[in-house]
Image (tube, rainbow, N blue to C red):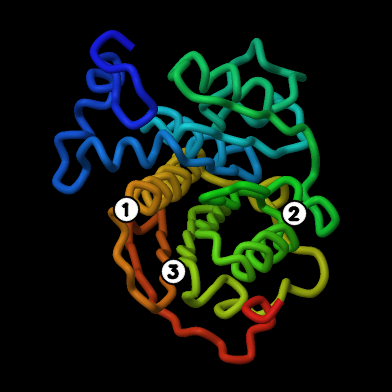
Amino acid sequence: MSRRDGEDLLSDSEIERYSRQLLLPGMGEASQLRLRRATAVVVGCGGLGGQAALYLAGAGVGRLRLVDPDRVALDNLHRQVAFRGADLGRPKVVALADALFARNPLIEIEPVDLTLGEESVGELLASADMVLECTDDPLSKFTVNDWCASRQIPLVVGGAIGFSGQVVVVRPGAPCYRCLFHSPPEGATRTCREAGVMGPLVGVVGSLQALEAIKALAGLADGGRRGRLVDFDGLSGRWRTIAFDRDQGCPAHSM
């Protein structure tokens, strides 16, 4: 740390690395230090999570925990831009960690090659300042939401299938994912494996998840009391933002 040596100051290399975002209104050294001190957990490291993690690492979020049990497959490569042909067969979290460290060696990265479930959610999300839910598993989304809502941990939930993408922003104490959708759908749900997905769509959704997470961690997010769903139709190019209220009977807030 050539110019400054201390936990509460940015080094010369950090100032140069993050210079373009440091120029933004409200995004000064204090906000960058907030990012450096933050821990974000990315649940699901495919198209959404891989894209989001690349931007979190680039922005200087200090600690990233990557959670995913899958291996890189050939049919991932059309949309999961963090991976290369040489990564085929490798654990996604390990391949992604390598890509993130190559992008920013100043951060800490913890790959966790496990499936998140009700029994493991507490351990896997421990110490998180922000959680990004990036899987295509509805049960995972509700499990992560309930844990975060009951502990007032900010959460950004993403989903993409076909040409349709959604992001739900959950602030501490505000309406949560369960307030909006109430319960997981009954029976089997369609995934990208059955329904397909347009590659750039997952990049759009993952990037938006990263943007919302970075704003919140840097102290730039608005403090609105309503929940927010952003819906994107990639075929027509239409965006919708839907505000929703807290369900007073939502069990996630009373756990």
Comes first in the chain, label 3 or label 1? 1
Q: Quadrant of the C terminus?
A: bottom right
**Residue 193 located left or right of residue 101:** right
Comes first in the chain, label 2 or label 1? 2
Residue 229: mark in rendering: 3
Q: Mark 3, mark 1: which one is toward the viewer?
A: 1
Q: Secondary structure at mark 3?
A: strand
Comes first in the chain, label 3 or label 2? 2
User: Looking at the image, which residue is at 57% across and 54% down?
Assistant: 161
Q: Amino acid at mark 1?
A: Gly
Q: Amino acid at mark 3?
A: Leu
Q: Return the x and y of residue 47 as percentages of the image width and height.
A: 56, 38
CA distance for labels 3 and 1:
20 Å
In contact (CB < 8 Å): disc 3 and disc 2: no
Q: Mark 3, mark 2: which one is toward the viewer?
A: 2
Residue 122: mark in rendering: 2
Q: Quadrant of the N terminus?
A: top left
In contact (CB < 8 Å): disc 3 and disc 1: no
Q: Secondary structure at mark 2?
A: helix
Q: Amino acid at mark 2?
A: Gly
Residue 164: mark in rendering: none
Which picture quadrant has residue 159?
Answer: bottom right
Q: Nearer the viewer, residue 211 or 1?
A: 1
CA distance for labels 2 and 1:
25 Å
Q: Return the x and y of residue 190 as percentages of the image width and height.
A: 71, 59
In the orientation shown, which residue stands out farthest toward the bottom?
248
In the orientation shown, which residue stands out farthest toward the front?
6
Q: Return the x and y of residue 222 as percentages of the image width and height.
A: 29, 65
Residue pointed to by mark 1 = 219
